[in-house]
Image: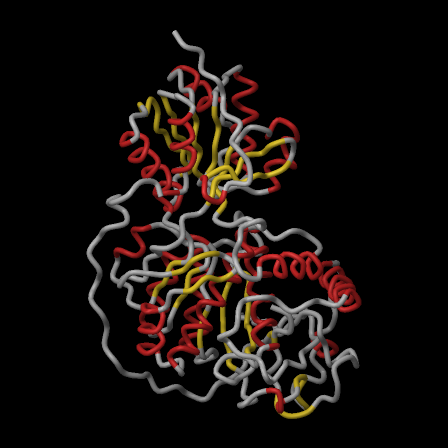
């Protein structure tokens, strides 16, 4: 069953912090949020736009709530005089409220289930938000899935928290179009079939007014046709494979830089260091294939010889043969593209066990788990990060502070990407003045903005044109932005190639 959760972050009424409860609430099962180039003229950047779309609406049947599963149930007292047009700083989370959240997160993570009736016993009656804080107290129901378990759980859990934080912030500002936002968020378990089932059920059952996108390219590729049929604007937080945007989806928008550029920083730094031979390994999924193919194209354009380009199946744990192939190819640089982040550390171990040394090693995704797995062995390696907390975007410091207070960890670019996608969705709706799909789409096509995630603008396909991403290097146990030079926090530590 589709169990959309109604949860919240600190700043609560139910805990007798924010004032009396009154008015009408979302049905049980909904979260009412309470907190939150490589070169010029590259062929990937200069493709012809796709044509527009038609107008019209689909008549909706009366909405019926989906069954809920237990989670957090505090709710918000939003600020009525806020505006979507102001900069992107986040609210300040009070230490007490953060403590309450973490306690509840621990509770829901434990094995003892809390009866649903206990968690939602007040949901069907009086509202858990102040209707006077909104122009229209009728909640705007936004449905989404995110990969909080399965192969993409590390990235997906962070992205889910980014959604939660953004929705809470929006509600503090008066919601979207004067309405409080209720977020229905379900775990798709990193499974494409389950994601399709969940979005189909949400949309065919008229359970939602709008949707946010799932995690990554694999899931987005199969969900986009569903949201397209139902004419729902779909701002994808973490899909980057260009081929998805070549399929003619009218309502799909990209937030990440294109996947084909994810290893571009590694390529450019390798050329700077005087490297000549590059190997590329890729997981056989849609995103890693795109990232690896893009890396090969960029490497050849830059004058690097690609001596090996080889794939491995999802779930691979024995990388010994691939490590030996890298050694036999005499590669100086190794770029690895994968969706399963465990592969990065496993490949480093396999190289060490095979006695294979490469001068430079880089990945399509930089996450702290890589450093945690390898310790000091991670130092000197590179990774793509579409976002870093030290970048000079509006509201970044507040976002980092509040995310850490709410979730007890630093945000990854996956969390920031979801937050940024949510912000872009909301700004487009406010600019359009409605959620009419064609008006909303046109507003997003025209929108140029900067969120905490960075610059955002798209072409007629909804394809990201403004955001480049960064390359980090692990230096003394810390991740440091080293590319591109205009946002680098430090010089890259590059190998010295002896002259002949």
The location of residue 189, given as percent across then percent down, is 53, 56
- Figure quadrant of the C terminus: top left
Foreground of the two, 263 or 347:
263
Find residue 138 and report its horizontal and vertical position in percent.
54, 88
Query: Considering depth in this image, is 310 or 414 the residue closer to the camera?
Result: 414
Q: Residue at x 39, y 21 (%)?
A: 274
* Relative image position of residue 163 (x, y in whole percent): 55, 65
Horizontally, is 386 left or right of 153 in the view?
Answer: left
Q: Does residue 154 appear in this view?
A: no
378 on left or right of 365: right
Please name the residue shown 78% across and 78% down the image: 15
Apparent side of residue 59 relative to residue 365 in the rendered image (left or right): left
The residue at 59%/84% (across/down) is 81
Q: How many marks?
A: 0
* Depth order, front residue of 347/372: 372
- Tell me where residue 460 sits by quadrant: bottom left
Q: Residue furthest front?
A: 486
Residue 355 at x, y percent in the picture: 53, 15
Q: Is residue 319 visible?
A: yes
Is residue 274 positioned above or below 119 on the image? above
Q: Residue 190, relative to residue 101: is it above or below? A: above
């Amino acid at each position: 069953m589709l169990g959309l959760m109604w949860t919240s972050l600190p700043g609560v009424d139910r805990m007798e912090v924010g004032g009396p409860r009154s008015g009408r609430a979302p049905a049980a099962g909904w979260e009412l949020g309470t907190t939150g180039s490589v070169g010029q003229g590259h062929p990937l950047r200069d493709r012809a736009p796709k044509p527009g779309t038609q107008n019209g609406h689909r008549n909706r049947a009366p909405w019926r709530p989906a069954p809920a599963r237990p989670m957090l149930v505090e709710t918000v007292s939003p600020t009525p005089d806020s505006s979507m047009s102001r900069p992107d700083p986040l609210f300040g989370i009070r230490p007490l409220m953060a403590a309450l959240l973490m306690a509840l997160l621990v509770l829901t993570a434990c094995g003892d289930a809390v009866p649903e009736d206990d968690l939602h016993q007040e949901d069907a009656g009086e509202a858990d938000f102040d209707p006077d804080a909104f122009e229209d107290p009728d909640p705007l129901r936004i449905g989404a899935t995110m990969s909080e378990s399965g192969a993409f759980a590390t990235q997906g859990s962070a992205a889910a928290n980014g959604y939660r934080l953004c929705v809470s912030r929006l509600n503090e500002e008066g919601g979207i179009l004067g309405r409080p936002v209720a977020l229905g968020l379900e775990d798709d378990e990193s499974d494409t079939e389950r994601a399709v089932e969940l979005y189909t059920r949400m949309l065919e059952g008229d359970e939602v007014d709008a949707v946010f996108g799932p995690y990554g390219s694999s899931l987005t590729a199969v969900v986009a046709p569903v949201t397209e049929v139902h004419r729902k604007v779909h701002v994808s937080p973490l899909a980057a494979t260009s081929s998805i945007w070549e399929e003619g989806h009218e309502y799909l928008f990209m937030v990440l830089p294109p996947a084909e550029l994810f290893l571009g920083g590694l390529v450019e730094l390798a050329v700077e260091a005087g490297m000549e031979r590059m190997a590329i390994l890729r997981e056989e999924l849609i995103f890693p294939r795109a990232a690896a193919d893009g890396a090969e194209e960029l490497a050849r354009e830059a004058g690097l010889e690609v001596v090996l380009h080889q794939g491995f199946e999802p779930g691979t744990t024995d990388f010994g043969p691939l490590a030996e192939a890298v050694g036999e190819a005499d590669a100086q640089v190794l770029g690895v593209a994968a969706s399963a982040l465990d592969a990065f550390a496993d490949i480093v171990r396999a190289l060490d066990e095979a006695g294979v040394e490469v001068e430079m090693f880089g990945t399509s995704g930089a996450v702290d788990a890589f450093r945690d797995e390898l310790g000091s062995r991670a130092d000197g390696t590179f990774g793509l990060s579409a976002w870093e907390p030290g970048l000079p975007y509006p509201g970044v410091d507040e976002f980092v502070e509040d995310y850490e207070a709410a979730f007890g960890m630093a945000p990854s670019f996956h969390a920031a990407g979801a937050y940024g996608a949510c912000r872009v969705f909301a700004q487009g709706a406010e600019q359009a003045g409605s959620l009419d799909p064609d008006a909303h789409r046109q507003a997003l096509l025209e929108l140029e903005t900067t969120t905490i995630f960075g610059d955002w603008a798209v072409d007629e396909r909804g394809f990201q044109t403004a955001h480049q991403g960064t390359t980090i290097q692990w230096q003394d146990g810390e991740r440091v932005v080293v590319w591109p030079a205009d946002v680098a926090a430090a010089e890259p530590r590059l190998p010295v190639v002896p002259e002949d």
